[in-house]
């Protein structure tokens, strides 16, 4: 275990993979903002009172940049269309928001310092400057070549893709993420500030921030889809990226499907479990609870309504209406992207015109294409295909004065897009895979209209507004628009039929669907999204200053272990003095995972274990018990060489105080007829779940699924538990779930009750206890920890509850593994031997 005081852990990693060049510190460390401290620690500059900041981190800053051709000076302005800028309006007035990201233009090295100062002072922006070659490898190389296609379900098996994973591109991705983290650290006050990281470009950045500040309040939101585990696990650095995300306190996704895929990956690749806590999904990871939030992004209602009311929008809408008078207008608005399904949409229009005679001459598709964000051969091929289909449709179905498909391939100003939205009777978004497409939301709001827009389109103020949506079921906004007609974009005929249905829908139905959509879109805007995410992030960080944190691992494997403040490692130096001065001791030991490692193939105790236990048992002041879920025949055979060792088998249903004593049972009058009910049920689930099996004990039945598919096994276990609880409702048994098991056992049989029974018996014999040691590793042992910790006696004994492994527990102490447990027990035996020799002298 390594503490956070260790130096640059990244530089300790062997090899060139993580040998990062340090980011140049071009930002002057002046007291420009609260939380930015001077470079010199002994500076006499007066300190400004710190205020909480929101630090928004993304690949690009929400800025437009242009260089004046005459003066040669850079001119910057806010990008009003940037979501990062829009979310600021959701925050309370006076909130300090700092943006960290790169610029969309290249700044010469000799200008970077001046630009940094200007952006910080005027825009609260901290630029991260990347050399062109590094940016190329990071963005075009790793982000666009690997992550973007993979997250949109395209495996790199095509001719255009390299067949081998290039580790140098991954190294560039790590380097850039670290540089972004360095820039955040320059303005971060870790005690107060919140950091919100956006999108797949910076998925490992949380690791670098968490490595420097264990308690940094850190959220991450993924704007793209997250693929299923079958797709994601093809990525060679899959685990590193997952661990990077898990260094955040909260992770946000657009839809439940994306979150479900992420959780499935965590279960399959890291063995993590999650549960719903008061409606929120909590993922347990090294003592920390990472909250997973499903929160679709919304639009900025105020800015869209302002554009809708602008005279230029109304004038353009009137012009469009007159241009397409008597025609039914369908609108498509997409980025130039291979995943937007534009050609599939055009094929559906072609089929609609071919088989629907009523539409030929009356239907017009206006397809607006935003310029591509990055070039590539696939983009060029998609363009070529789109133009070919458009030309074929217009040649086949067009006529003088009628063009069925109008293609607008340029960047339109906001007011023109708004006008097209307002005029179109139907909007179709046919992407084959998309994160959160906001086009349907904008269309709904624009169809709601405004006084000026209604006047321009000659719509009576009393007339109800309508809209119809045909959207792909593979886009992020699909689940939230329940009144839309959802389609499979690959089903050309189905899309054509859905368009016909949308266009022939009654006005009343169009109105009802529109009202339902508008109510949702207007109430779940970008302000709602940002407020909810930050509120939940604040809740997720509440325990930061309660628990103690330790840094673990090197480089990109770094993570933080969070444990209660009174949780400490149990050392022989700490426990031995107490052990030596006490005269009546009880020692409870779990077996699997405690005395013998879970990873050991040989489960029987060796000579080393037997010798250590005998040394403890031979002291008349000690009562030593093995408390295990195993059956009594196995345990009695394994420990036949330990004459004075007590055994509590099957969680304590059978108890034997020493080898030659008889077995006691906690409930002698129990019948086990319930096994005839439970066993057939378990058998049916075993037959249906490959890799599962049944473990039959004298008093219990256990269904094991550790070798089954992780997701299917957990699903079956939950279903089996519900099924067993239903059929055994009138039986004196309990059905419990544990680590890859579902167990049915008699009521009242727990390790906690067993420990209480043994302790009570010892006290009744007139020998008050003054020392109790309990060591275990799994959930069933937590009952023992709770039982001994709740002991209330007139003379309170010294209690040492110890779990194996660093993890949340009712125990106040921990030991790393079973080897450390044996070392501790051997040390206690040695101390006792030394004391006995001294007494004999």
Image: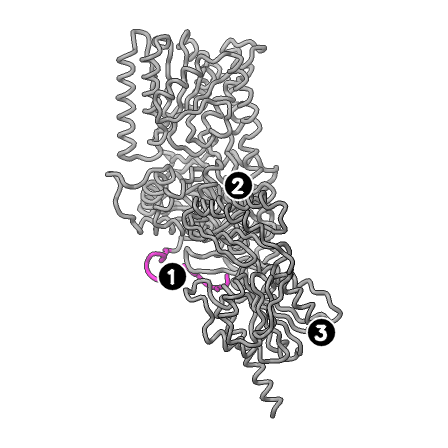
Question: Alpha-carbon neighbours of circle 1 within 10 Å: few (<14), some, or many (≥20)?
Answer: some
Q: How far, Cα to Cα, is label 1 from label 2?
A: 33 Å
Q: Which of marks 1 and 2 is nearer the N terminus?
A: 1
- Write down the residue under mark 3: 765
* Distance of label 3 from label 1 (alpha carbons): 59 Å
Q: Which residue bears the numbered disc 2?
A: 293
x and y, in percent, of residue 663 in the image: 60, 68
Element under disc 3: loop
> Which percent across, then down, holds residue 604?
46, 68
Secondary structure of the residue carrying numbered label 1: loop
Q: Does 566 sit left or right of 240 as displayed?
A: right
Dot 2 alpha-carbon crowd within 10 angstroms: few under 14, some 14 to 19, many 20 or more: many
Q: What stretch is highlighted in magenta?
A: 1-21
Q: Main secondary structure of the magenta part?
A: loop
Secondary element under disc 2, as helix, strand or loop, is: strand
Find residue 760 and report its horizontal and vertical position in percent: 69, 67
Nearer to us of marks 1 and 2 is: 2
Give the mark nearest the N terminus, 3 or 1.
1
Cβ–Cβ under 8 Å for marks 1 and 2? no
Near-viewer residue (77 or 288): 288
Q: Residue drawn 48% across and 36% down?
A: 255
Residue placed under numbered mark 1 in the picture: 13
Q: Residue at x 53, y 13 (%)?
A: 508
Front: mark 3 or 1: 3
**Above or below, 241 relative to 63:** below
Q: Which residue occupies the extreme left position in the image?
A: 159
Which quarter of the figure has residue 369? top left
Q: Which of 46 and 785 is in front in this view?
A: 785
């Amino acid at each position: 275990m390594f503490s956070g005081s260790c130096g640059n852990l990244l530089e300790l990693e062997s090899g060139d993979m993580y040998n990062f060049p340090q980011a140049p510190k071009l930002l002057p460390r002046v007291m420009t903002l609260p939380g930015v401290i001077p470079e010199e620690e002994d500076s006499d500059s007066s300190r400004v009172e710190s205020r909480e900041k929101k630090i928004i981190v993304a690949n690009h800053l929400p800025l437009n940049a242009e260089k004046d051709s005459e003066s040669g000076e850079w001119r910057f302005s806010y990008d009003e269309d940037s979501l990062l800028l829009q979310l600021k309006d959701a925050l309370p007035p006076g909130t300090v928001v700092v943006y960290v990201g790169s610029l969309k233009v290249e700044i010469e090295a000799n200008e970077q310092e001046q630009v940094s100062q200007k952006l910080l002072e005027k825009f609260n922006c901290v630029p991260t400057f990347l050399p062109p070659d590094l940016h190329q490898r990071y963005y075009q190389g790793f982000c666009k070549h690997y992550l973007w296609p993979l997250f949109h379900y395209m495996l790199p098996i095509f001719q255009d893709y390299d067949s081998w994973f290039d580790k140098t591109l991954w190294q560039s991705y790590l380097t850039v993420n670290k540089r972004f983290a360095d820039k955040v650290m320059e303005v971060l006050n870790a005690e107060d500030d919140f950091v919100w990281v956006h999108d797949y470009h910076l998925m490992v950045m949380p690791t670098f921030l968490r490595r420097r500040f264990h308690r940094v309040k850190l959220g991450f939101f993924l704007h793209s889809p997250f693929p299923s585990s079958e797709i994601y696990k093809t990525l060679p650095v899959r685990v590193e990226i997952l661990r990077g995300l898990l260094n955040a306190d909260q992770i946000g996704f657009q839809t439940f499907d994306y979150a479900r895929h992420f959780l499935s990956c965590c279960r399959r690749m890291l063995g993590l479990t999650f549960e719903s806590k008061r409606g929120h999904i909590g993922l347990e990871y090294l003592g920390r609870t990472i909250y997973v939030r499903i929160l679709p992004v919304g639009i900025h209602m105020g800015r869209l309504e302002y554009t809708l009311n602008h005279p230029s929008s109304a004038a353009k809408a009137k012009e469009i209406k007159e241009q397409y008078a008597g025609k039914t207008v369908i609108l498509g608005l997409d980025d130039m992207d291979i995943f937007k399904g534009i050609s599939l949409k055009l094929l559906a229009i072609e089929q609609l015109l071919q088989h629907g005679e009523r539409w030929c001459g009356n239907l017009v598709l206006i397809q607006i294409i935003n310029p591509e964000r990055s070039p590539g051969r696939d983009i060029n091929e998609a363009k070529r295909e789109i133009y070919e289909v458009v030309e074929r449709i217009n040649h086949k179905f067009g006529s003088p004065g009628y063009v069925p498909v109008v293609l607008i391939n340029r960047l339109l100003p906001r007011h023109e897009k708004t006008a097209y939205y307002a005029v179109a009777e139907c909007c179709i978004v046919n992407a084959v895979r998309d994160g959160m497409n906001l086009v349907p939301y904008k269309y709904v709001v624009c169809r709601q209209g405004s006084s000026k827009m209604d006047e321009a389109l000659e719509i009576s103020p009393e007339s109800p507004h309508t809209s119809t949506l045909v959207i792909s079921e593979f886009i992020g906004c699909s689940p939230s628009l329940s009144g839309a007609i959802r389609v499979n974009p690959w089903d050309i005929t189905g899309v054509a039929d859905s368009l016909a249905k949308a266009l022939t829908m009654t006005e009343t139905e169009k109105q009802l669907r529109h009202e339902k959509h508008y109510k949702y879109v207007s109430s779940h805007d970008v302000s709602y999204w940002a407020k909810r995410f930050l509120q939940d992030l604040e809740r997720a960080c509440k325990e930061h200053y309660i628990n103690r944190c330790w840094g673990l691992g090197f480089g990109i494997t770094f993570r933080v272990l969070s444990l209660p403040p009174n949780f400490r490692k149990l050392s022989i130096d700490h426990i031995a003095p107490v052990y030596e001065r006490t005269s009546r001791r009880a020692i409870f030991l779990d077996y699997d995972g405690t005395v013998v490692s879970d990873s050991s193939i040989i489960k029987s105790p060796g000579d080393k274990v037997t010798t250590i236990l005998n040394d403890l048992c031979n002291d008349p002041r000690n009562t030593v018990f093995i408390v295990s879920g195993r059956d009594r025949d196995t345990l009695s055979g394994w420990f036949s060489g330990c004459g004075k060792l007590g055994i509590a088998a099957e969680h304590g249903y059978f108890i034997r105080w020493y080898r030659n004593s008889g077995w006691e049972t906690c409930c002698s009058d129990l019948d086990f007829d319930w096994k005839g009910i439970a066993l057939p049920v378990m058998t049916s689930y075993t037959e249906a779940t490959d890799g599962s099996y049944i473990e039959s004990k004298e008093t219990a039945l256990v269904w094991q699924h550790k070798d089954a598919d992780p997701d299917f096994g957990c699903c079956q276990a939950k279903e089996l538990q519900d099924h067993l609880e239903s059929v055994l409702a009138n039986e004196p048994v309990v059905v419990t779930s544990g680590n890859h098991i579902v167990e049915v056992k008699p009521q009242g049989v727990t390790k906690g009750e067993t420990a209480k029974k043994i302790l009570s018996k010892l006290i009744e014999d007139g020998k008050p206890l003054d020392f109790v040691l309990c060591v275990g590793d799994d959930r069933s042992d937590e009952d023992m920890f709770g039982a001994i910790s709740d002991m209330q006696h007139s003379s309170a004994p010294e209690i040492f509850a110890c779990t194996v492994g660093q993890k949340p527990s009712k125990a106040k102490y921990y030991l790393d593994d079973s080897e450390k447990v044996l070392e501790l027990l051997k040390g206690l035996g040695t101390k006792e031997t030394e004391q006995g020799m001294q007494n004999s002298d």
